[in-house]
Image (cartoon, grey):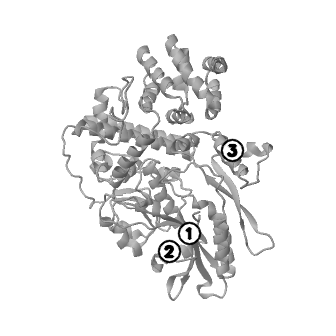
Amino acid sequence: MKNHVNHILVAEFDIDKGSQITHQYPEKTGIEEHKLAELMLPDGAHLREEDWTSFILNQHIVENPLPTINNETNLLYVLNLVRTKQIPGVRRGARVKAIAISSHHKWLHVFKPLLIMALDSYFEKQEISILEKLYKSMNSLDISLMPLLSYNEKIILRASDDPMLFNESFVEVEEFAMAMNKHNNNLPSNQIKKIDRHFYETNVLYDTGAKNPIKVPIKIPMTMFNGEIGDLSVIQLISTFGNSAYPSKHHPHLDNNVPTNSIIILINALLTQKRILFLGHLKPSGEVANFVLAACALGSCGILRGYSERCFPYTNLAGLDDLLKVPGFIAGVTNPAFEEHPQWWDVLFNINTGKVTISPNIEKAPPLVNNIFTSGEKDTSLVSSFDKEFMNDIMNLIQQKYGEHYIRERFRLYLLRFIEVVAEYEKIVYGNTKIGYTTENINDKYNLGVGAFFTDEISKRREIVYNVNRIEGWRNTKSYELYKKDFYQSLLRKSVRNVDIRRQANILRNVPYIHPEKLNTILKSLAENITTDEQVLELLIHFLHNQDGLLPIASSLLHSSESIRINCTKILVRLDYSPLMKNQLKNLKRDGEEIGLLLVLIQPIQRN
């Protein structure tokens, strides 16, 4: 079995020699030691008592912006703790030491308590045995009982506050392990209510040299997506730049040459593979790193890949040459010299001031090859209000203390909509698309249509016109190429093949009046195609608990048409068979007396 931790690194600052690597256990990383030391002992580390930061190893530096292979599986994520300790009698009165771990897990932040204790011990005694014990303790972590949730399951679990959602997945693994006599730790039934299945909870023993080892609790998040590394905060990123002044310079890929919210500029910069720099002068490197990791999570949203290879949570002037070789890097720095060299970056986000600057040296966007969707000021201003309203909504949600996962889910839906529009654009301009549903990959058995839903042709054109610059910008990037591969793989896994569920969900949720004949066809298509547990999951990711849940479907129980009510009932009865849906239906019963009463009445139907 693969180790959880690959390396333990120790660095310290020597007044005469500078930053030095003193240990690499159990073997060397293969990275030049002076580069590791510079990353582990960031600028200004001596000014603060403690700082956490992170960086990534095995990033292939390539000149070609389009990938030939995916390197994300080879990456090692590094969590680093640096501490300055005042010690009377030593030169300059203090010592600066750092300890770091590398891991292929993106949830390596769960090891923070162990790193704190290990560095405490290392300050007392600089012995290799401390690293040996730490390495042994971390790699003793047993996750054999941790179920592997699918992408759809992660989406559903994130959107729910129910701590026991997917409990059957955990219980199934535990029962299998006990049957194989691998474990004998059956959980007493009176403790089951204390469990939160959003996390896998366990513990490791850490030998501090005392009589008894310390039992350290570990909580591994179950819903981390690709592109999310550590315990980052998207809310902190949005709060810092969400109300920033508009940059004075414009670029069609970034803002369509109109005043645009800074977070939208960031998303567009990520989509179109611009060089992004976060500057935090005199800020802890860990705080700067959080902004970089949050930006990568925002750009990915569990949908797009390719950001981790270009992510540099912390770097400095010593790493400048390597940084500039990476197309579309996302990096964090604390040295203000970077701001004075706009030729090094395309967009700079100043954490101290909240100011966003578009470089005067940014590469010009190539002219559009096709003029079908040339934008006019009227079209752009009409649709750009969507982004303004979206960001106003996000800022209000943050002020109302909505949680991290809810905010990320809103951006995931925003990104999904953009990709839908790109696919529609490609069908019109290029005659085909490889990133969206068409009648070639979905059997439109019920003639309901596939792909993005627009209320009318005018709104379709306006939305495409508004997005056309960033569409063409994204189509020439690494993340676009990777998404084409990922979309193809998702088609192979798809279990509902006769109806585009997302399109029908958007219609049910957003169209005020649906003709009874069409509504009946939509419900019939869902009733006939949602039969297996996997198909239930595919349905539910479009009717999440934090987006009115099943209410857009269940409201048809009150329709005057008998056939509509019957098809609606068939869907809900099928869902009621799923253990996953018990609480969803209970929540629906609380949403309205009439619908709740009807749901109580239809549940016995499945018993007959």
Per the image, the residue denoted by label 1 is 6
Q: Are marks 2 and 1 in contact (CB under 8 Å)?
A: yes
Give coordinates of residue 277: x percent, y percent.
39, 61
At which x and y percent is residue 125? 68, 82
- Amino acid type at mark 3: Val
Residue depth check, mark 3 versus mark 2: number of the one nearer the observer = 3
- The image quadrant that residue 317 belongs to is bottom left
- Closer to the chain start, of discs 3 and 2, is 2
| Residue at the (43%, 19%) spot, across then down | 521
Real-space CA distance between mark 2 and mark 1, rounded to the nearest whole angstrom:
9 Å
- Reading the image, the residue beneath label 3 is 171
SS for callout 3? helix
Please state, as top left, top right, bottom left or bottom right, where the N terminus lies in the image. Answer: bottom right
In this rendered view, identify the residue nearer to me: 511 or 347. 511
Inter-mark Cα distance, 3 to 2: 38 Å
Q: Label 1 is placed on what type of residue?
A: Asn
Between 199 and 527, the one lying in front of the other is 527
Q: Residues within 10 Å of mark 3 (few under 14, many from 20)?
A: some
Q: Nearer the viewer, residue 97 or 536?
A: 536
Look at label 2 and name its amino acid. Thr
Residue in the image at 69% along x and 44% along y: 171
